Amino acid sequence: MIERLQISHLRNLSQVNLPATACNVIIGANGSGKTSLLEAIFLLSRGKSFRHHQPKRYIQHHQDNATVHAKLSDSSTLAIQKQADATTILRLNQTTVYNQSILTEQLPTLLIDPSTMDMLEQGSASRRQLLDWLVFHMKQGFHPQWVAYQRLLRQRNSLLKKSRHLTQVQLAELKAWDKGLSNHAALIHHYRERIFSEWQPYFAQSIAQLLPTYAEQLSLSYSAGYDTNVALDVQLNERLEQDLQLGYTRIGNHRADIHVHWRSSEPLAMHEGQLTKSTKVEGDVHTKLPVLKEQAANVLSRGEKKLLITALRLSQLPLLLNTEKGTDNSNNDFKSRVTPVVLLDDITAELDDRAIEILLSTLAQLPCQVFMTSLTEDIVPLVNKFWSEPNMFHVKQGQISSAQ
Ligand SMILES: Nc1ncnc2c1ncn2[C@@H]1O[C@H](COP(=O)(O)OP(=O)(O)OP(=O)(O)O)[C@@H](O)[C@H]1O
Protein backbone atom coordinates (compact mmCIF):
# COMPACT_ATOMS: atom_id res chain seq x y z
CA MET A 1 0.00 0.00 0.00
CA ILE A 2 1.22 3.52 -0.80
CA GLU A 3 2.00 5.43 2.40
CA ARG A 4 3.41 8.58 0.84
CA LEU A 5 3.20 9.88 -2.69
CA GLN A 6 5.42 12.57 -4.18
CA ILE A 7 4.87 14.04 -7.62
CA SER A 8 6.95 16.65 -9.44
CA HIS A 9 6.09 18.47 -12.65
CA LEU A 10 3.30 16.27 -13.92
CA ARG A 11 0.79 18.47 -15.76
CA ASN A 12 -0.36 21.17 -13.32
CA LEU A 13 1.01 19.28 -10.30
CA SER A 14 4.29 21.11 -9.64
CA GLN A 15 5.12 19.59 -6.26
CA VAL A 16 2.85 17.18 -4.42
CA ASN A 17 3.68 15.41 -1.18
CA LEU A 18 0.76 13.38 0.07
CA PRO A 19 0.25 10.94 2.93
CA ALA A 20 -2.01 8.08 1.86
CA THR A 21 -4.20 5.56 3.61
CA ALA A 22 -6.57 2.76 2.55
CA CYS A 23 -9.05 5.18 1.02
CA ASN A 24 -8.07 8.55 -0.43
CA VAL A 25 -10.56 11.01 -1.89
CA ILE A 26 -9.41 13.91 -4.05
CA ILE A 27 -12.04 16.62 -4.49
CA GLY A 28 -11.64 19.50 -6.89
CA ALA A 29 -13.18 21.51 -9.71
CA ASN A 30 -12.72 20.77 -13.40
CA GLY A 31 -9.10 21.21 -14.43
CA SER A 32 -7.82 21.34 -10.84
CA GLY A 33 -5.51 18.32 -11.26
CA LYS A 34 -7.48 15.36 -9.87
CA THR A 35 -7.00 13.04 -12.84
CA SER A 36 -3.34 14.04 -13.01
CA LEU A 37 -2.85 12.59 -9.54
CA LEU A 38 -4.32 9.25 -10.63
CA GLU A 39 -2.26 9.49 -13.81
CA ALA A 40 0.89 9.84 -11.69
CA ILE A 41 0.16 6.64 -9.74
CA PHE A 42 -0.65 4.80 -12.96
CA LEU A 43 2.59 6.07 -14.52
CA LEU A 44 4.63 4.76 -11.61
CA SER A 45 2.93 1.38 -11.83
CA ARG A 46 2.80 0.89 -15.59
CA GLY A 47 5.46 3.18 -17.02
CA LYS A 48 2.92 4.95 -19.20
CA SER A 49 0.01 7.30 -18.87
CA PHE A 50 -3.56 6.20 -19.46
CA ARG A 51 -4.17 9.48 -21.28
CA HIS A 52 -1.21 10.11 -23.61
CA HIS A 53 1.65 7.97 -24.78
CA GLN A 54 4.04 10.85 -25.33
CA PRO A 55 5.67 12.04 -22.09
CA LYS A 56 5.94 15.59 -23.41
CA ARG A 57 2.14 15.79 -23.11
CA TYR A 58 2.10 15.15 -19.38
CA ILE A 59 5.46 16.62 -18.34
CA GLN A 60 4.70 20.09 -17.01
CA HIS A 61 5.17 22.83 -19.59
CA HIS A 62 8.70 24.34 -19.50
CA GLN A 63 10.04 21.41 -17.45
CA ASP A 64 12.47 18.70 -18.53
CA ASN A 65 10.94 15.77 -16.72
CA ALA A 66 8.14 14.47 -14.52
CA THR A 67 8.85 12.38 -11.42
CA VAL A 68 6.65 10.18 -9.26
CA HIS A 69 7.91 8.62 -6.04
CA ALA A 70 6.05 6.36 -3.61
CA LYS A 71 6.92 4.93 -0.23
CA LEU A 72 5.01 1.73 0.44
CA SER A 73 3.87 0.46 3.81
CA ASP A 74 6.61 -2.18 3.85
CA SER A 75 9.09 0.77 3.59
CA SER A 76 10.11 -0.04 0.05
CA THR A 77 10.33 2.90 -2.36
CA LEU A 78 9.47 3.12 -6.03
CA ALA A 79 10.28 5.96 -8.40
CA ILE A 80 9.92 6.83 -12.04
CA GLN A 81 11.25 9.79 -13.96
CA LYS A 82 10.08 10.45 -17.51
CA GLN A 83 11.89 12.82 -19.82
CA ALA A 84 10.43 14.49 -22.87
CA ASP A 85 12.34 12.20 -25.25
CA ALA A 86 10.71 9.23 -23.42
CA THR A 87 13.91 8.33 -21.58
CA THR A 88 12.81 6.62 -18.39
CA ILE A 89 14.64 6.19 -15.10
CA LEU A 90 13.22 3.61 -12.71
CA ARG A 91 14.24 3.05 -9.11
CA LEU A 92 13.31 0.40 -6.58
CA ASN A 93 14.65 1.08 -3.08
CA GLN A 94 16.97 3.77 -4.50
CA THR A 95 18.56 1.30 -6.90
CA THR A 96 18.15 1.76 -10.62
CA VAL A 97 16.20 -1.02 -12.29
CA TYR A 98 15.80 -1.56 -16.00
CA ASN A 99 12.44 -3.26 -16.34
CA GLN A 100 9.12 -1.57 -15.70
CA SER A 101 7.67 -4.98 -14.82
CA ILE A 102 9.69 -4.89 -11.57
CA LEU A 103 7.76 -1.81 -10.42
CA THR A 104 4.48 -3.13 -11.85
CA GLU A 105 4.80 -6.24 -9.71
CA GLN A 106 5.24 -4.12 -6.57
CA LEU A 107 2.36 -1.80 -7.36
CA PRO A 108 -0.55 -3.38 -9.26
CA THR A 109 -2.95 -0.63 -10.27
CA LEU A 110 -6.45 -1.11 -11.57
CA LEU A 111 -8.05 1.87 -13.26
CA ILE A 112 -11.83 1.74 -13.12
CA ASP A 113 -12.76 4.25 -15.72
CA PRO A 114 -16.33 3.68 -16.90
CA SER A 115 -16.03 6.53 -19.38
CA THR A 116 -13.91 4.39 -21.71
CA MET A 117 -16.87 2.97 -23.57
CA ASP A 118 -14.90 2.12 -26.68
CA MET A 119 -13.43 -0.87 -24.87
CA LEU A 120 -16.41 -2.97 -25.95
CA GLU A 121 -16.67 -1.81 -29.53
CA GLN A 122 -13.17 -1.04 -30.71
CA GLY A 123 -9.96 -3.03 -31.30
CA SER A 124 -9.12 -5.99 -29.12
CA ALA A 125 -6.05 -4.46 -27.42
CA SER A 126 -7.76 -3.02 -24.34
CA ARG A 127 -9.85 -6.15 -23.80
CA ARG A 128 -6.75 -8.33 -24.15
CA GLN A 129 -4.92 -6.10 -21.66
CA LEU A 130 -7.73 -6.65 -19.20
CA LEU A 131 -7.01 -10.38 -19.17
CA ASP A 132 -3.24 -9.90 -19.32
CA TRP A 133 -3.33 -7.64 -16.25
CA LEU A 134 -4.67 -10.59 -14.28
CA VAL A 135 -2.36 -13.12 -15.86
CA PHE A 136 0.69 -10.91 -15.26
CA HIS A 137 -0.10 -10.44 -11.59
CA MET A 138 -1.08 -14.05 -10.98
CA LYS A 139 1.32 -16.09 -13.07
CA GLN A 140 5.04 -15.70 -12.59
CA GLY A 141 5.89 -17.40 -15.87
CA PHE A 142 3.67 -15.29 -18.12
CA HIS A 143 5.68 -12.08 -18.53
CA PRO A 144 8.96 -13.58 -19.80
CA GLN A 145 7.00 -15.61 -22.35
CA TRP A 146 5.12 -12.53 -23.49
CA VAL A 147 8.30 -10.44 -23.81
CA ALA A 148 10.02 -13.19 -25.83
CA TYR A 149 6.93 -13.61 -28.04
CA GLN A 150 6.75 -9.86 -28.72
CA ARG A 151 10.44 -9.73 -29.64
CA LEU A 152 10.09 -12.55 -32.19
CA LEU A 153 6.87 -11.06 -33.54
CA ARG A 154 8.58 -7.70 -34.09
CA GLN A 155 11.43 -9.40 -35.99
CA ARG A 156 8.96 -11.39 -38.08
CA ASN A 157 6.83 -8.36 -38.93
CA SER A 158 9.82 -6.26 -39.85
CA LEU A 159 10.97 -8.99 -42.27
CA LEU A 160 7.46 -9.31 -43.73
CA LYS A 161 7.30 -5.56 -44.20
CA LYS A 162 10.68 -5.40 -45.93
CA SER A 163 10.20 -7.99 -48.64
CA ARG A 164 7.35 -9.75 -50.37
CA HIS A 165 9.66 -12.53 -51.62
CA LEU A 166 11.99 -14.18 -49.16
CA THR A 167 15.40 -15.64 -49.97
CA GLN A 168 16.19 -19.17 -48.79
CA VAL A 169 18.24 -17.71 -45.93
CA GLN A 170 15.40 -15.40 -44.86
CA LEU A 171 12.93 -18.26 -45.10
CA ALA A 172 15.08 -20.46 -42.86
CA GLU A 173 15.38 -17.60 -40.38
CA LEU A 174 11.63 -17.03 -40.42
CA LYS A 175 10.94 -20.70 -39.78
CA ALA A 176 13.23 -20.67 -36.76
CA TRP A 177 11.41 -17.62 -35.38
CA ASP A 178 8.05 -19.28 -36.05
CA LYS A 179 9.11 -22.30 -34.06
CA GLY A 180 10.04 -20.02 -31.17
CA LEU A 181 6.79 -18.08 -31.50
CA SER A 182 4.87 -21.33 -31.46
CA ASN A 183 6.49 -22.49 -28.21
CA HIS A 184 5.85 -19.17 -26.46
CA ALA A 185 2.31 -19.02 -27.89
CA ALA A 186 1.33 -22.36 -26.40
CA LEU A 187 2.42 -21.25 -22.92
CA ILE A 188 0.86 -17.79 -23.16
CA HIS A 189 -2.42 -19.38 -24.24
CA HIS A 190 -2.21 -21.91 -21.42
CA TYR A 191 -1.79 -19.14 -18.81
CA ARG A 192 -4.53 -16.98 -20.30
CA GLU A 193 -6.99 -19.83 -20.65
CA ARG A 194 -6.49 -20.94 -17.07
CA ILE A 195 -6.88 -17.46 -15.58
CA PHE A 196 -9.82 -16.73 -17.88
CA SER A 197 -11.75 -19.73 -16.59
CA GLU A 198 -11.04 -18.66 -13.00
CA TRP A 199 -12.20 -15.14 -13.77
CA GLN A 200 -15.60 -16.11 -15.25
CA PRO A 201 -17.47 -16.85 -11.98
CA TYR A 202 -16.18 -13.57 -10.48
CA PHE A 203 -17.46 -11.71 -13.53
CA ALA A 204 -20.86 -13.42 -13.18
CA GLN A 205 -20.95 -12.34 -9.54
CA SER A 206 -20.15 -8.70 -10.40
CA ILE A 207 -22.80 -8.68 -13.12
CA ALA A 208 -25.35 -10.10 -10.67
CA GLN A 209 -24.61 -7.13 -8.40
CA LEU A 210 -24.23 -4.32 -10.90
CA LEU A 211 -26.53 -5.44 -13.72
CA PRO A 212 -28.88 -7.91 -12.04
CA THR A 213 -31.43 -7.93 -14.88
CA TYR A 214 -28.70 -9.36 -17.11
CA ALA A 215 -27.35 -11.86 -14.61
CA GLU A 216 -28.47 -14.84 -16.70
CA GLN A 217 -27.82 -13.25 -20.04
CA LEU A 218 -24.27 -11.93 -20.14
CA SER A 219 -21.27 -14.17 -20.50
CA LEU A 220 -17.61 -13.89 -21.41
CA SER A 221 -15.63 -15.81 -23.97
CA TYR A 222 -11.93 -15.87 -24.73
CA SER A 223 -10.46 -16.38 -28.18
CA ALA A 224 -6.79 -17.27 -28.37
CA GLY A 225 -6.00 -15.44 -31.62
CA TYR A 226 -5.23 -18.66 -33.48
CA ASP A 227 -6.44 -22.27 -33.67
CA THR A 228 -4.93 -23.79 -30.55
CA ASN A 229 -5.48 -27.34 -31.82
CA VAL A 230 -2.71 -26.86 -34.37
CA ALA A 231 0.82 -25.63 -33.57
CA LEU A 232 1.15 -21.93 -34.38
CA ASP A 233 4.23 -22.42 -36.59
CA VAL A 234 2.29 -24.85 -38.79
CA GLN A 235 -0.48 -22.28 -39.25
CA LEU A 236 2.02 -19.47 -39.84
CA ASN A 237 3.66 -21.56 -42.53
CA GLU A 238 0.30 -22.17 -44.23
CA ARG A 239 -0.46 -18.44 -44.21
CA LEU A 240 2.95 -17.15 -45.12
CA GLU A 241 1.89 -15.91 -48.55
CA GLN A 242 -0.99 -13.90 -47.05
CA ASP A 243 1.23 -12.47 -44.33
CA LEU A 244 3.81 -11.47 -46.94
CA GLN A 245 1.13 -9.63 -48.90
CA LEU A 246 -0.14 -7.90 -45.77
CA GLY A 247 3.28 -7.17 -44.33
CA TYR A 248 2.38 -8.36 -40.85
CA THR A 249 1.44 -11.49 -38.91
CA ARG A 250 -2.31 -11.96 -38.78
CA ILE A 251 -2.66 -14.74 -36.25
CA GLY A 252 -1.18 -15.45 -32.84
CA ASN A 253 -1.53 -14.50 -29.18
CA HIS A 254 -1.33 -10.83 -30.14
CA ARG A 255 -4.81 -11.23 -31.67
CA ALA A 256 -6.41 -12.80 -28.60
CA ASP A 257 -9.65 -11.23 -27.44
CA ILE A 258 -12.30 -11.23 -24.77
CA HIS A 259 -15.92 -11.00 -25.91
CA VAL A 260 -18.98 -10.19 -23.88
CA HIS A 261 -22.07 -11.97 -25.19
CA TRP A 262 -25.69 -11.35 -24.58
CA ARG A 263 -28.11 -14.26 -24.86
CA SER A 264 -31.83 -13.72 -24.52
CA SER A 265 -33.94 -15.77 -22.19
CA GLU A 266 -37.19 -14.19 -23.31
CA PRO A 267 -39.65 -15.20 -26.03
CA LEU A 268 -38.86 -13.76 -29.43
CA ALA A 269 -41.86 -11.43 -29.36
CA MET A 270 -40.22 -9.50 -26.52
CA HIS A 271 -37.14 -8.80 -28.58
CA GLU A 272 -38.31 -8.26 -32.11
CA GLY A 273 -37.57 -4.58 -31.83
CA GLN A 274 -33.98 -5.34 -30.87
CA LEU A 275 -33.21 -7.58 -33.85
CA THR A 276 -30.31 -6.32 -35.93
CA LYS A 277 -28.62 -7.79 -38.98
CA SER A 278 -26.02 -9.46 -36.80
CA THR A 279 -28.55 -11.01 -34.41
CA LYS A 280 -28.40 -14.79 -34.57
CA VAL A 281 -31.60 -16.68 -33.82
CA GLU A 282 -31.18 -20.16 -32.43
CA GLY A 283 -33.97 -22.74 -32.43
CA ASP A 284 -37.38 -22.78 -34.06
CA VAL A 285 -39.01 -19.35 -34.16
CA HIS A 286 -42.44 -21.02 -34.06
CA THR A 287 -41.83 -22.52 -30.64
CA LYS A 288 -41.92 -18.89 -29.38
CA LEU A 289 -38.87 -19.60 -27.25
CA PRO A 290 -35.92 -19.08 -29.54
CA VAL A 291 -32.67 -17.84 -28.08
CA LEU A 292 -31.14 -14.67 -29.49
CA LYS A 293 -27.40 -14.05 -29.39
CA GLU A 294 -25.54 -10.79 -29.82
CA GLN A 295 -22.43 -8.95 -28.81
CA ALA A 296 -23.43 -7.28 -25.52
CA ALA A 297 -22.29 -3.91 -26.90
CA ASN A 298 -25.09 -4.06 -29.50
CA VAL A 299 -27.81 -4.58 -26.91
CA LEU A 300 -26.85 -2.59 -23.82
CA SER A 301 -27.64 1.06 -23.26
CA ARG A 302 -24.85 3.58 -22.69
CA GLY A 303 -25.31 3.47 -18.92
CA GLU A 304 -25.47 -0.32 -18.93
CA LYS A 305 -22.20 -0.47 -20.86
CA LYS A 306 -20.56 1.63 -18.15
CA LEU A 307 -21.81 -0.82 -15.56
CA LEU A 308 -20.53 -3.71 -17.65
CA ILE A 309 -17.06 -2.15 -17.94
CA THR A 310 -17.09 -1.52 -14.19
CA ALA A 311 -18.08 -5.16 -13.59
CA LEU A 312 -15.31 -6.41 -15.87
CA ARG A 313 -12.67 -4.54 -13.91
CA LEU A 314 -14.12 -4.90 -10.45
CA SER A 315 -14.48 -8.67 -10.84
CA GLN A 316 -10.72 -8.98 -11.28
CA LEU A 317 -9.88 -7.84 -7.77
CA PRO A 318 -11.48 -10.59 -5.65
CA LEU A 319 -9.92 -13.18 -7.94
CA LEU A 320 -6.47 -11.64 -7.60
CA LEU A 321 -6.83 -11.25 -3.85
CA ASN A 322 -8.40 -14.66 -3.23
CA THR A 323 -5.67 -16.39 -5.10
CA GLU A 324 -3.09 -14.38 -3.25
CA LYS A 325 -4.58 -15.48 0.01
CA GLY A 326 -3.48 -18.92 -1.06
CA THR A 327 -6.58 -20.78 -2.15
CA ASP A 328 -4.41 -22.53 -4.69
CA ASN A 329 -1.32 -23.44 -2.72
CA SER A 330 -0.68 -26.43 -4.94
CA ASN A 331 0.60 -24.17 -7.68
CA ASN A 332 3.83 -22.39 -6.87
CA ASP A 333 3.62 -20.26 -9.99
CA PHE A 334 1.45 -17.72 -8.17
CA LYS A 335 3.08 -14.42 -7.40
CA SER A 336 3.63 -13.03 -3.95
CA ARG A 337 1.11 -10.84 -2.13
CA VAL A 338 0.93 -7.13 -2.83
CA THR A 339 -1.86 -4.63 -2.22
CA PRO A 340 -3.56 -3.57 -5.44
CA VAL A 341 -4.25 0.12 -5.86
CA VAL A 342 -7.62 0.99 -7.40
CA LEU A 343 -7.95 4.30 -9.22
CA LEU A 344 -11.51 5.61 -9.59
CA ASP A 345 -11.78 8.68 -11.77
CA ASP A 346 -14.88 10.79 -11.27
CA ILE A 347 -17.28 7.88 -10.80
CA THR A 348 -20.10 10.15 -9.63
CA ALA A 349 -20.26 11.61 -13.12
CA GLU A 350 -20.35 8.17 -14.74
CA LEU A 351 -22.36 5.82 -12.52
CA ASP A 352 -25.71 6.01 -10.74
CA ASP A 353 -25.97 6.05 -6.93
CA ARG A 354 -26.80 2.37 -6.65
CA ALA A 355 -23.78 1.34 -8.74
CA ILE A 356 -21.46 3.66 -6.79
CA GLU A 357 -22.67 2.17 -3.53
CA ILE A 358 -22.06 -1.40 -4.79
CA LEU A 359 -18.65 -0.43 -6.15
CA LEU A 360 -17.50 1.28 -2.95
CA SER A 361 -18.89 -1.35 -0.59
CA THR A 362 -17.16 -4.09 -2.61
CA LEU A 363 -13.85 -2.24 -2.61
CA ALA A 364 -14.07 -1.47 1.12
CA GLN A 365 -14.35 -5.18 1.86
CA LEU A 366 -11.24 -6.05 -0.15
CA PRO A 367 -7.66 -5.57 1.04
CA CYS A 368 -6.91 -2.96 -1.60
CA GLN A 369 -6.06 0.74 -1.56
CA VAL A 370 -8.37 3.23 -3.25
CA PHE A 371 -7.70 6.66 -4.74
CA MET A 372 -10.86 8.31 -6.04
CA THR A 373 -11.57 11.71 -7.53
CA SER A 374 -14.76 13.71 -7.31
CA LEU A 375 -15.95 17.11 -8.46
CA THR A 376 -17.99 17.65 -5.32
CA GLU A 377 -18.22 16.54 -1.69
CA ASP A 378 -21.37 14.55 -2.43
CA ILE A 379 -19.37 11.34 -2.32
CA VAL A 380 -18.07 11.96 1.22
CA PRO A 381 -21.02 10.48 3.25
CA LEU A 382 -20.83 7.27 1.22
CA VAL A 383 -17.07 7.04 1.68
CA ASN A 384 -17.50 7.55 5.44
CA LYS A 385 -20.09 4.79 5.47
CA PHE A 386 -17.60 2.22 4.16
CA TRP A 387 -14.17 3.37 5.40
CA SER A 388 -13.41 4.31 8.99
CA GLU A 389 -10.55 6.76 8.40
CA PRO A 390 -10.46 7.94 4.80
CA ASN A 391 -8.08 10.72 3.75
CA MET A 392 -9.84 13.66 2.14
CA PHE A 393 -7.96 16.16 0.00
CA HIS A 394 -8.93 19.29 -1.85
CA VAL A 395 -7.12 20.21 -5.02
CA LYS A 396 -7.06 23.72 -6.47
CA GLN A 397 -4.93 24.64 -9.48
CA GLY A 398 -2.51 21.82 -8.81
CA GLN A 399 -2.19 22.53 -5.08
CA ILE A 400 -3.37 19.69 -2.87
CA SER A 401 -4.34 20.21 0.75
CA SER A 402 -5.79 17.96 3.39
CA ALA A 403 -9.51 18.49 3.99
CA GLN A 404 -9.39 17.25 7.60
N1 LIG B 1 1.77 19.42 -19.76
C1 LIG B 1 1.04 20.20 -18.96
N2 LIG B 1 1.64 21.15 -18.19
C2 LIG B 1 0.91 21.93 -17.36
N3 LIG B 1 -0.42 21.84 -17.22
C3 LIG B 1 -1.06 20.91 -17.96
C4 LIG B 1 -0.38 20.05 -18.86
N4 LIG B 1 -1.28 19.24 -19.44
C5 LIG B 1 -2.48 19.58 -18.94
N5 LIG B 1 -2.36 20.58 -18.05
C6 LIG B 1 -3.42 21.21 -17.21
O1 LIG B 1 -3.53 20.49 -16.02
C7 LIG B 1 -4.81 20.73 -15.44
C8 LIG B 1 -5.26 19.49 -14.72
O2 LIG B 1 -5.89 18.55 -15.56
P1 LIG B 1 -6.65 17.29 -14.99
O3 LIG B 1 -7.13 16.53 -16.17
O4 LIG B 1 -5.84 16.58 -13.98
O5 LIG B 1 -7.89 17.99 -14.25
P2 LIG B 1 -9.12 17.35 -13.48
O6 LIG B 1 -9.13 17.97 -12.12
O7 LIG B 1 -9.13 15.89 -13.56
O8 LIG B 1 -10.31 17.96 -14.33
P3 LIG B 1 -11.71 17.36 -14.82
O9 LIG B 1 -12.58 17.27 -13.61
O10 LIG B 1 -12.15 18.42 -15.76
O11 LIG B 1 -11.44 16.06 -15.49
C9 LIG B 1 -5.68 21.23 -16.57
O12 LIG B 1 -5.99 22.58 -16.31
C10 LIG B 1 -4.81 21.14 -17.80
O13 LIG B 1 -5.02 22.19 -18.70
Image (cartoon, rainbow, N blue to C red):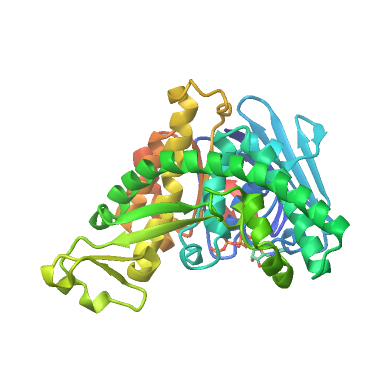
Q: Can residue 297 be seen at all in this image of the molecule?
A: yes
Query: Which of 380/274 is in front?
Result: 274
Q: Nearer the viewer, residue 348 or 167?
A: 167
Left or right: where 210 falls relative to 27 = left
Q: Is residue 11 above or below residue 26?
A: below
Q: Quadrant of residue 260?
A: bottom left
Q: Residue 366: x, y in percent?
A: 42, 34
On the picture, is 192 further left or further right than 87? left
Residue at image coords 56%, 46%: 132
Q: How many marks?
A: 0
Residue 259 position (above or below residue 367) = below
For ligand 1, give the image quadrant: bottom right
Taking the view exactly as shown, the residue that stands out farthest to the left is 287
The front one of 32 and 326 is: 326
Q: Residue at x 36, y 64 (%)?
A: 296
Indicate the quadrant where residue 387 lies.
top left
Name the residue: 52% across, 68% down. Answer: 122
Q: Is residue 110 visible?
A: no
Pick whichever, 229 or 222, lies toward us.
Answer: 229
Outermost residue to the top: 330
Residue 317 position in % (x across, y down): 46, 40
Residue 239 location in percent, x, y?
65, 63
Which residue is found at the position 45% from the left and 59% from the top?
Answer: 114
Q: Name the side, left or right, on which 167 lies relative to 106.
A: right
Which quadrant, please, contains the N terminus? top right
Query: Residue 76: x and y, percent?
Result: 69, 28
